[in-house]
């Protein structure tokens, strides 16, 4: 009887079942990687069974690729809401850095998925038909900010938008992915609030100094506080 009710629930809400499977899979792959992930656990955590899982998303590798695609789609969708085109170029870059940093903090499973896929040399991501198309508009959004910055005289050079984003993401990703070992090595808690705030201010100052040709000292604590305060109010 319970099994019949479960099947009926699945039939009534196939979209909801698919979403639950993908969310359970994201948590499983983030915690255990592709090799260590278990379909039984994913199905149980989604209140499903393996037959439902295979029906909705195929085998484990297919499910993993769909989770990867969903992870990239989520961050790109949120980036599109940043409204960078209506900000002065330095403020737009500061907002992008602030968003990237806080997105990584809020979504540690995203970093875990990236680590897993990088260990696999992007073997599974190469099979995706969606990921590349997601990134073209994002690159153009950054390019437009940089171009405006050069035209306004705020930025010295029109840097490659891909290189710029990789630098921004790298400054955040390395720190957060290695915070456990770095905290031990340097004898400080790199994830406490003061340390996180200091890191964000440092990242913004470093990137803006590179773009503007000014010293990082120009982007001191008062300037960073004003920039971040304005961004958080806008959000």
Image (cartoon, grey):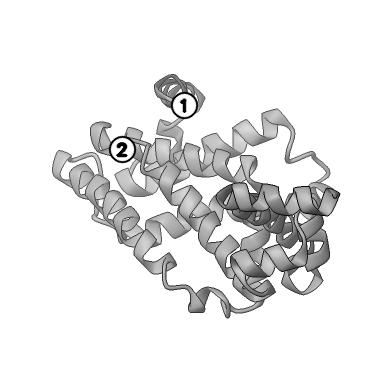
Contact, CB < 8 Å: mark 2 with mark 1?
Answer: no
Quadrant hosting residue 80:
top left
Q: Is residue 228 left or right of residue 45?
A: left
Sequence-wise first label, 2 or 1: 2
In percent of width and height, residue 151 lies at: 14, 44
Q: Is residue 85 left or right of residue 119?
A: left
In percent of width and height, residue 213 lies at: 32, 46
The residue sitting at the left extreme is: 151
Q: Which residue is mark 1?
A: 228
In percent of width and height, residue 203 lies at: 51, 43
Quadrant hosting residue 214:
top left
Q: Which residue is mark 2?
A: 84
Q: From the viewer's perspective, is the residue at label 2 or at label 1 nearer? A: 2
Q: Is residue 214 left or right of residue 127?
A: left
Whether residue 195 can be seen here:
yes
Classed neighbour count for the residue bearing mark 2: other residues with Cα under 10 Å, few (<14), some (14–19), many (≥20): many
Q: Residue at x 65, y 61 (%)?
A: 113
Given residues 229 and 12, the one toward you in this image is 12
Q: Circle 1 — which element?
A: helix
* Label 2 – label 1 distance at C-alpha: 14 Å
Q: Residue at x 51, y 25 (%)?
A: 221
Q: Residue at x 80, y 40 (%)?
A: 188
The number of numbered badges drawn on the structure is: 2
């Amino acid at each position: 009887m319970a099994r019949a009710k479960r099947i009926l629930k699945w039939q009534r809400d196939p979209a909801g079942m698919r979403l639950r499977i993908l969310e359970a899979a994201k948590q499983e792959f983030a915690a255990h990687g592709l090799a260590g992930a278990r379909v039984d656990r994913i199905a149980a955590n989604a209140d499903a069974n393996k037959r439902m899982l295979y029906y909705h998303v195929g085998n484990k590798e297919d499910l993993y690729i769909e989770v990867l695609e969903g992870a990239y789609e989520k961050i790109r969708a949120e980036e599109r809401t940043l409204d960078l085109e209506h900000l002065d170029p330095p403020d737009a870059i500061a907002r992008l850095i602030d968003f990237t940093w806080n997105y990584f903090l809020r979504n540690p499973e995203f970093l875990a998925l990236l680590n897993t896929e990088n260990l696999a040399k992007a073997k599974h991501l190469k099979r995706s038909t969606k990921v590349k198309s997601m990134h073209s508009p994002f690159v153009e959004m950054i390019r437009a900010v940089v171009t405006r910055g050069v035209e306004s005289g705020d930025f010295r050079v029109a840097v490659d938008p891909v290189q710029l984003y990789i630098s921004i993401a790298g400054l955040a990703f390395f720190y957060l992915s290695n915070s456990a070992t770095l905290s031990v090595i340097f004898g400080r808690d790199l994830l406490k609030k003061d340390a996180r705030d200091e890191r964000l201010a440092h990242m913004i100052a470093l990137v803006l100094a590179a773009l503007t040709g000014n010293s990082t000292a120009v982007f001191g604590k008062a300037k960073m506080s004003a920039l971040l305060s304005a961004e958080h109010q806008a959000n």
